[in-house]
């Protein structure tokens, strides 16, 4: 018995060593419980290959990533202690190990059914930050029961995945002391909130404390129920106006597509809380547009409504970035997803650097004068 089990693990190690490994599944738990199986695949984290183990529970998935050696040590402990079946797929052969309840062992091999190209396709899929099988995606109407992305939700899924890629890049490059307090202002139905919490908690294994602030109580109830169902212990939602929200600590302030001046209220909260990161994707820009004097240097072209709208966006968001710089943030403004997926695709990211830009206020003044703007709402909140 021991020899067969040992042979199985030797095949796993050899497949990893020879770059033949495709995937491994442990199934048939020895005792009835929540954990159903463990699904193991390869991923690249910071340019190093890891074994990514997805623990499939009845109602949720959890992922832990291991370097090869620790991963193999962990997996070895699972059979026969926790699971009775193991299926290894390599580019050379498939190997199955089955232990009956009486302790009899079957060790089966067959020619490979997955080849390198299958494996490569799999690798490609792995580059996604958010696995479509994550159970909350189904509850949010992004995927079906089989974990496949619904046709009508493809754009939303792409947006979520891109957002997580950006946040991963941002937060792993300047790690904060955990637990990290994150406030998501105007969290809506929680697509991005759930994805970020899940990714940071379950993929990166960080200790996260996250709150979604949302005006609409029905959405807040929906999100709180879902967080509970998913056992997302440190994720909660409150029905409140952003302007009334207060917290002792906000290290990451997020405001995605919060309407018009709600974005300014959120940025001001971030600045006042000394947030280390402020991430926003503004949506409508009415406040500045209403004030823009049409008789400025651009009047010959601003007669076109769409250009006037773009001009208002440019000035509104440009001034937001300048005010953040004045308060000691370095800023980046970029399109965070192709405009074919969503029109609301501009992102402003402020990273606290403690080097305030003293010229920024003068620059804001000049812009306002040029366009006949009396005030930007963010100034009203801060000065
Ligand atoms: C367009 S949705 C965006 C939801 C989510 N952030 C996303 O990007 O998927 C904007 C949300 O902000 C909420 N909201 C707008 N103003 C708010 C305020 N002052 N306080 C709290 N929530 C607000 C709205 O109710 C709405 O659900």
Image: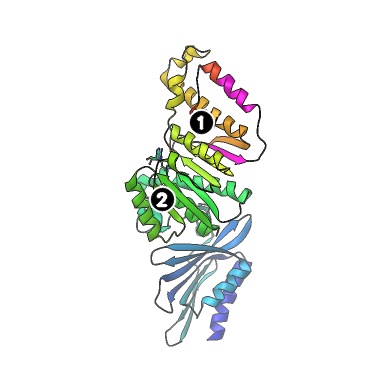
Say what secondary structure mark 2 lies in.
strand
Quadrant location, ligand no. 1: top left
Which one is in front, 181 or 68? 181
Residue 193 image position (x, y, % from top left): 45, 49
In-front residue for pair 175/43? 175
Gap between marks 1 and 2 measured at Cα:
25 Å
Quarter in which the C terminus is drawn: top right
Q: Earlier in the sequence, mark 1 or mark 2?
A: 2
Queried whether the magenta region covers residue 178, the answer comes back as no
**Residue 237: numbered disc:** 2
At 43% from the left and 57% from the top, the residue drawn is 134
Check disc 1: other Cα within 10 Å, few if <14, some if 14-19, many if 20+. many
Q: Residues within 10 Å of mark 2 (few under 14, many from 20)?
A: many
88 or 366: nearer the viewer:
366
Residue at 62% from the left image edge and 51% from the top image edge: 175
How are the residues colored? rainbow
- Quarter where residue 355 is shown: top right
Is residue 351 found inside the magenta-colored segment of the image? Answer: yes
Looking at the image, residue 89 lies above or below residue 360: below
Name the residue rendered at 65%, 34% in the picture: 356
Location of residue 347 with respect to 101 vertically, above or below: above
Where does the magenta region start and end?
348-367
The residue labelled by disc 1 is 378
Q: Position of residue 71 (x, y in %)?
A: 58, 69
Q: Is residue 121 visible?
A: no
């Amino acid at each position: 018995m021991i020899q067969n089990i040992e042979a199985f693990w030797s095949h796993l190690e050899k497949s990893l060593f020879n770059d033949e490994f495709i995937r491994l599944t442990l199934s048939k738990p020895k005792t009835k419980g929540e954990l159903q199986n463990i699904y193991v695949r390869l991923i690249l984290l910071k340019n190093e290959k890891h074994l990514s183990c997805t623990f499939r529970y009845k109602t949720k998935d959890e992922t832990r990533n291991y370097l090869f050696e620790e991963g193999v040590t962990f997996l070895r402990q699972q059979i026969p202690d926790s699971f009775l079946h193991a299926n290894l797929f390599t580019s050379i052969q498939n190997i199955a190990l089955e232990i009956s309840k009486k302790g009899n062992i079957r060790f089966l091999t067959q020619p490979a059914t997955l080849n390198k190209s299958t494996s490569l396709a799999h690798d490609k899929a792995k580059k996604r930050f958010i696995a479509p099988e994550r159970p909350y995606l189904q509850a949010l109407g992004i995927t079906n029961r089989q974990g496949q992305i619904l046709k009508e939700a493809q754009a939303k899924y792409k947006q979520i995945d891109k957002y997580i890629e950006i946040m991963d890049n941002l937060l792993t490059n300047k790690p904060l002391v955990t637990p990290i307090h994150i406030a998501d202002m105007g969290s809506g139905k929680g697509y991005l909130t759930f994805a970020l919490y899940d990714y940071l908690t379950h993929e990166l294994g960080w200790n996260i404390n996250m709150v979604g602030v949302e005006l609409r109580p029905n959405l807040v109830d929906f999100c709180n129920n879902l967080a509970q169902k998913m056992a997302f212990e440190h994720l909660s939602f409150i029905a409140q106006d952003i302007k009334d929200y207060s917290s002792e600590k906000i290290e990451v302030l997020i405001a995605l597509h919060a309407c018009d001046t709600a974005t300014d209220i959120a940025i001001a909260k971030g600045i006042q809380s000394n947030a280390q990161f402020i991430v926003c994707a503004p949506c409508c820009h009415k406040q500045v547009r209403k004030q823009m004097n049409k008789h400025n240097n651009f009047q010959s072209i601003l007669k076109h409504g769409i250009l006037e709208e773009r001009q208002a966006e440019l000035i509104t968001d440009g001034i937001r970035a300048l005010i953040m710089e004045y308060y000691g943030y370095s800023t980046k403004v970029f399109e965070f997803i192709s405009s074919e997926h969503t029109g609301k695709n501009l992102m402003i990211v402020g990273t606290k650097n403690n080097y305030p830009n003293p010229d920024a206020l003068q620059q804001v003044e000049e812009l306002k004068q040029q366009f006949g703007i009396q005030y930007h709402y963010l100034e009203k909140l801060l000065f």
